[in-house]
Image (cartoon, helix red, strand yellow):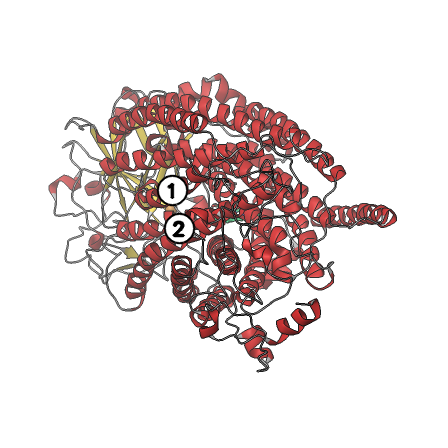
Amino acid sequence: MGTAHHEHHDLHAQDLGKEHAHDDHHHDDHHHHEESFITKYVFSMDHKTISRQFLITAVIMAVIGMMMSILFRLQLAWPGEKFAIANALLGDKWAPEGILDPNMYMGLVTIHGTIMVFMVLTGGLSGTFSNLLIPYQIGARDMASGFLNMLSYWFFFASSLFMVMGMFVEGGPASGGWTVYPPLSALPQAMPGSGLGMTLWLVSMSLFIVSSLLGGLNYIITVLNMRTKGMKMTRLPLTIWAFFVTAILGVLSFPVLFSAALLLIFDRSFGTSFYLSEIYIDGHALDNMGGSPILFQHLFWFLGHPEVYIIILPALGLTSEIISVNARKPIFGYRAMVTSILAIGFLSFIVWGHHMYITGMNPFLGSVFVFTTLLIAIPSAVKAFNYITTLWKGNIQFTPGMMFAIGLVSTFVTGGVTGIILADSALDIPLHDTYFVVAHFHIVMGLSAILGMIAGVYHWFPKLFLRQMNKNMGYIHFWLTFIAAYGVFFPMHFLGLSGVPRRYYTNTAFPIFDNLQDINEVVTWFAILGAFAQVIFLFNFFYSMFRGPKSPQNPYGANTLEWTTPMAHTHGNWPGAIPEVHRWPYDYSKPGAEKDFIPQTVPLAEGEEDGGGH
Amino acid sequence: MEFLIYLILILAAATIWQIMRVVELSNDLKGNDPNKVTENDNRMNGVLMITFISVMFIWVIWQLFEYGSRTLPRAASEEGQRIDDLMNFNWYIVIAVFFLTNGALFLMAYKYYGRDKSKSAYITHNNKLEMLWTGVPAVVLAVIIFWGITLWNDVTQSEISKDVRRVEVYSKQFNWVARYSGADKELGKASFRYISATNELGLDSTDQHAQDDIVVGELYLPVNEDVNLVFRSQDVIHSAFLPHFRAQMNTVPGMQTNFKFKPTITTADMRKDPDVVGHIAEVNAIRKAKGEKPIVFDYWLLCNKICGASHWNMKMKVVIVSRKEYDIWLAGQKTFGGAKTAPVTAEASGKEKTDTIK
Ligand code: HEM
Ligand SMILES: [Cu+2]
Ligand SMILES: [Cu+2]
């Protein structure tokens, strides 16, 4: 088939019906049902379009979240100083004369956290890459249900909208922290943000949970049922394993968050007392009796802990693939990697109590959670060591994606080791809710996942937008980002070890912290550098989307199936039959092979063993 | 400050723009595919990787000394000292793993940067190696788990004898109140329903034990004696954080929580601790430069659970004194019964009491 023919085909075979999705005949017969702009770009059911929708929404949300962090970082470094930018962005009510209002400080911290955790690194990360790569890499024409997939995006979109809307209501956005512990979040008398702002937060999160469930069920079913011939589970790329386990975690844990939110809505609006008891506030003794605020924390963290793995696993999956491709070497210990993902997935459900050591939870339970939590360090360590050994004796191609992937491994280790300290309940006593925790979770989860996500964007940009991002801008972006990342979060450990609590508007009430102010200034300077670096990225991203050089079909010499599809947004992915898979995805630099990669579609030679086994 | 930030940003942008142009131009001249990674790119980034981690390590070591010296002074409680011992043991492991693993990562990245002529080794797995790095962490973690759980049980679950002094610490937006039992050594009953302007803890004035209770805004404790702090909260969750004693417990409305510890260093002695003397000198030098009043060292109880707009300013001074000074101090305080202006009864102080609490 000639190229011209392909092009033609790509443009017109948009509305491949469900019945065509599985059959193997060549689609030489042209479908001439034109699609409108609306069905093609807006209410699209195509996994690639949905993936791009998720990505662009997440990028916008990330910019908002980052701006918020700069605003509150300015306040922390130079409390009481006037910043015209704060006034320009927040107005006279929340930043009179450019000095941030304490309630707005809390609001910014809360919405920043929520946006980063849920909109960017859950919806954005899984939504973009599970959608893009699951059908591509397992050899499917699309997701099991394109319609539910489309709904998943639009629920996500609505959820993001409500979250941002909260910023503009009377009383300000939800401001009880992203964990929204009641009674603080349940009682508007306790803080202005617990009024309408909190209601919008709950609406937003409910929509988000729906989106996440629709997406997750789709991912699970697609991976289980729609793999192409020869794609055994043991031949799945690690990306897919990661997305698959992530989706299972989400489907099992998000409903619990939903119930937590629902009970909170009842307490707020219908006078129930699930979380409230014996409260005297604003001059009144409330009628609510018998509830338990601790119950909320159990429900919240039953999701909350798996949630951090929902964030990190996809990033690790992307990294596994990127590191192997660019080291031109098989991923080290494929089976151990899969086992680790499964172990982490399982263990993540029985560790939630480590967030609650000093809440008044029964201390015996604390010991149990110490045990389970420290167990999870083992599969995590295995993953880190396996990445390093994958580089060993490799021939590393430093694409920008590869640089970010290596950055992820570094932050995953650096943030992971401090987890050993926090997991130890006795050591958590003096560190809980201090800046040490802020340092720990940003490095291990925030940075790692963000670096992994950016790595994925660079690496799969050709599959997302058919073009390439500029390499040199990518390098500058990486180095500035990476330096800023450690610059922001490493010194925070010492603030925590000095006893500085998190979620403080300023430390000026405690003169004993006065000699830590220069640390706070250093952190803010690095935060500004980090934000600056992202401007370079944004420019590169949007510019390359339209004007970047066209990408060749398989720019990195990779084995997985997405690179066997043409560089076009073909509906149904493969213009012809879906390829059959004959080997694992990591045959890089295999001795005896003529090139340094052997795509999964190449049959095993006589007597050749499939890789990855033991 | 803001102007300075913008100036720096503009200069940085201009520099990067220039660098980009030079790089792109030289690429154009060579006629290269601009986005193909070349051996030059690999070498440059490989070298940058090893440079980065070297500088990072030096910076981390600098921080360990410079910022590390500003962290909390030695623990002022028995439990705190034990926590610090375990903490230090963990630090050895954590710091070693941090340096070794990051070092190995960036060393690999540098050593194996891509050359046009080389090829990777085909290594899929190595069971022995993988057993090793599953086994070694498992053993180390077993030690940490065992030690950690033992300590945790001792600190939080040991039997508290009847003789241990109970002091109530009460939280509300946005301050702390302490309550001592009087001569009868028993804290009187209290309920949120009795709260009023003159009775901010909601003590039950019909309860005999409440009459001699002492309600104060500072936490005095005798040195070298166990104390069991029992916590209640009026409105939302707060957290009583006593960093110098390595003690912390959330205060939860509708529930009583507690934390037992034994202070070992009086405030007066801590003020003479060389570490603390240095710290306070540093702080006062900074304050002097800003024209602020000098401070002396004190223990503080901070709120450490987000609780509203003034969360950052919710604190109580903690004073550790000898038993003798403590007894004198306590004897000098007014009792609840004595301080009362009018008798508050359960009926009188009901829900109709409004807007008085501050
Ligand atoms: C631009 C880089 C970032 C900076 C400078 C930054 C800084 C901060 C700071 C200073 C806080 C407040 C800590 C406190 O007072 O308790 C915070 C909170 C938080 N950040 Fe970030 N952050 C950044 C990126 C991220 C990312 C990528 C994530 C994704 C996980 C994230 C997640 C959170 C969360 C969950 C919180 C807690 C919010 C809460 O307390 O409710 N941040 N961040
Ligand atoms: Cu957790
Ligand atoms: Cu508080």
Which is nearer the eye, B204 or A177?
A177
Establish whether ligand 2 lies closer than 8 Å to the Cβ of label 2.
no
Query: In the drawing, does residue B124 fall left or right of residue A183?
Result: right
Please tell me the numbered disc located at residue A245.
2
- Residue A44 location, x and y as percent? 53, 73
Q: Are marks 2 and 1 in contact (CB under 8 Å)?
A: yes
Which is nearer the eye, A335 or A311?
A335
- Residue A595 location, x and y as percent? 65, 43
Under mark 2, the amino acid is Val
Under mark 1, the amino acid is Ile
The residue where tag 1 is placed is A344
For marks 2 and 1, the one nearer the N-term is: 2
- Determine the CA span between mark 2 and mark 1: 9 Å
Q: Secondary structure at mark 1?
A: helix
Residue at 66%, 33% in the rendered image: B49
Query: In the drawing, does residue A220 fall left or right of residue A57?
Result: left
